[in-house]
Image (spheres, rainbow, N blue to C red):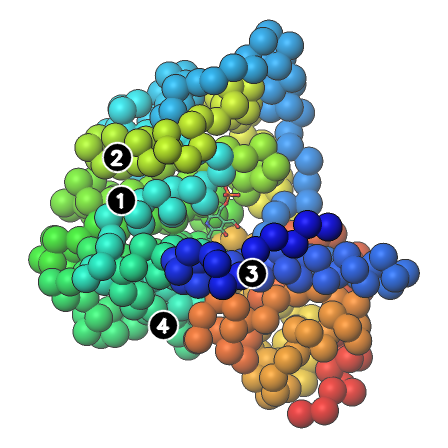
Amino acid sequence: MVDGMSPTRLAGRMSRLGTESAFDVLVRARALEAQGREVVHLELGEPDFDTPEHIVEAGVKALQDGETHYTPAAGIPALREAIANHVSATRGVQYGPDNVVVTPGGKPIMFYAILALAGPGDEVIYPDPGFPIYGSVVNFAEATPKPLPLREERGFRFDLDELREMVSERTSLVIINSPGNPTGGVLGDEELSLLAELAEQYDFYVLSDEIYREIVYQGEPGKSIVSYPGMAERTIILDGFSKTYAMTGWRLGYGVMPRTLAEAVARLAINCNSCVPGFTQLAGVAALTGPQEPSRAMVTEFRRRRDAIVAGLNEIPDVRCQMPEGAFYVFPNVSAYGAGVADYLLNEAGVALLDGAGFGEQGTGYMRISYANSLPNIEKALERIADALENKQR
Ligand code: PLP
C-alpha cells in the first residue's frame, strides 16, 4: 500500500470538509460480516428494490445504440426538457430546459449551489438534524453555518420564531429538506409561508432538497416552496432519480433554478464532472415519461414497513419514535440509554444503523434507522434491538 504524504500536507480547506457516516458504518458492518457475523443493514438510505425494468431496458438500449460519449454539461436536451415538463407540472411553476442542470446524482447540486451562492461573510441556514453534507459544504465554502433546530415535538419541523431570529441581512441561503433525512418530517404551509416571506424581505435564496418528494404517506406530495409568491426567482429545487426510481447506482439527479444561476452551476459542473453519461440520462427520460406504478408500489411497501418499525420501536421501554410522514427513515429518541447506542447495537446485536449525532448537534440522543429493507429483516432487527437494549448499561 502506498501511504504518501503526511495528512498535515493536505490543503487547509480539507480540515473543513466533513463526511457522511452511513458509508463509514457500512465499512464497519462489512468488516464484521467478513469475520462471519451476520448483520441486518439499516444504515443506508437506498431502496432495496431493483430499478424498474423499463428503465433498465432504456439504459441498455442506449448503450447498445452507442450513447457512450461526452454529452452537454447541463444534460442532453431530451432529459432537460422531460425534467422541465415534470417539474412544471408537479410544482406549478413554468420551467424550460434552460432552467435545468443534470448532475451525477442529486448530491452535486448541494455542492454547486452552495459554492455558487455562499462564501466568507455569508450565513447559510440548514436543518439540524439534517443531511450532513449541507454543513460540510457550507464550512468548505468558508461561509458561516447556522444550523436550524428541527423539533421532535413539532414533528421535526423548525420553530417559526427560531427561524425569524436566525435570518438577517447576512443570510445568503436557506436549505430545507422535506420530506427530510434523517427524520422523515414534512414541512407544512406555516413554515413554508414564513420562509417565503423572509426570503423576499432579506433577499436570500432557498435550496429546496426535494429528493424524497414522492415518498409520502398522507395524500399527495406537499407544495414546494417554489410555488409561493416571489419564490420562483430565488429557489433551487434539488431532485433526482435515486430514491423515487431506485436508481442510486446510476448516479442521476438534477437542479432546477433561475437561468443565470443554472449557467453558473453548469460552469461548476464543467470544472468538475463534465457531464453525466448519455445512457444514464436516457434511462432517466424513460423513468419520467414511462409508467409510474413501480414507484407507487414501492411507497405502498415502505408504508407497511414504516408502520411495523414505528410500532415495534415504541414497544421497547424508554424508546420514543414519531410516525414519520415521508422518506424511509425513522428517528427514534433513545436518549434514556445514554451515549454510544448505535455502536453498541452494531457490535452487540449485529444491527447497522446510524447515530443521530452524525446529523447535527440536535441529533444527539437519537438514531437514524432506514427501513428500506424487507419486513422480515426489520422484524429481526427489532427483536435484536429490544434484547440488546434490555442488557445495556445506562
Ligand atoms: N438529499 C438527501 C436529503 C439525501 O438523503 C440524499 C441521499 O441520500 C441526496 C440528496 C442525494 O441523493 P443522490 O445523490 O444519490 O441522488
**N-term mark: 4 or 3:** 3
- The reply to whether callout 2 and callout 1 are in contact (CB within 8 Å) is yes
> Which residue has dot 3 on it?
6
> Which residue has dot 4 on it?
149
SS at mark 4? Answer: strand
Q: Residue 51, can we see it?
A: yes
**N-term mark: 4 or 2:** 4
**As drawn, 394 above or below 84:** below
Name the amino acid, label 1: Ala
How many discs appear? 4
**N-term mark: 2 or 1:** 1
Name the amino acid, label 2: Ala
Q: CA distance from mark 3 to mark 1?
A: 31 Å
Of tags 3 and 1, which is closer to the observer? 3
Query: Could you tell me which residue is drawn at 19 percent across and 32 percent down?
Result: 260
> Which residue has dot 1 on it?
116
Residue 185: quadrant of the picture? bottom left
**As drawn, 63 above or below 149:** above
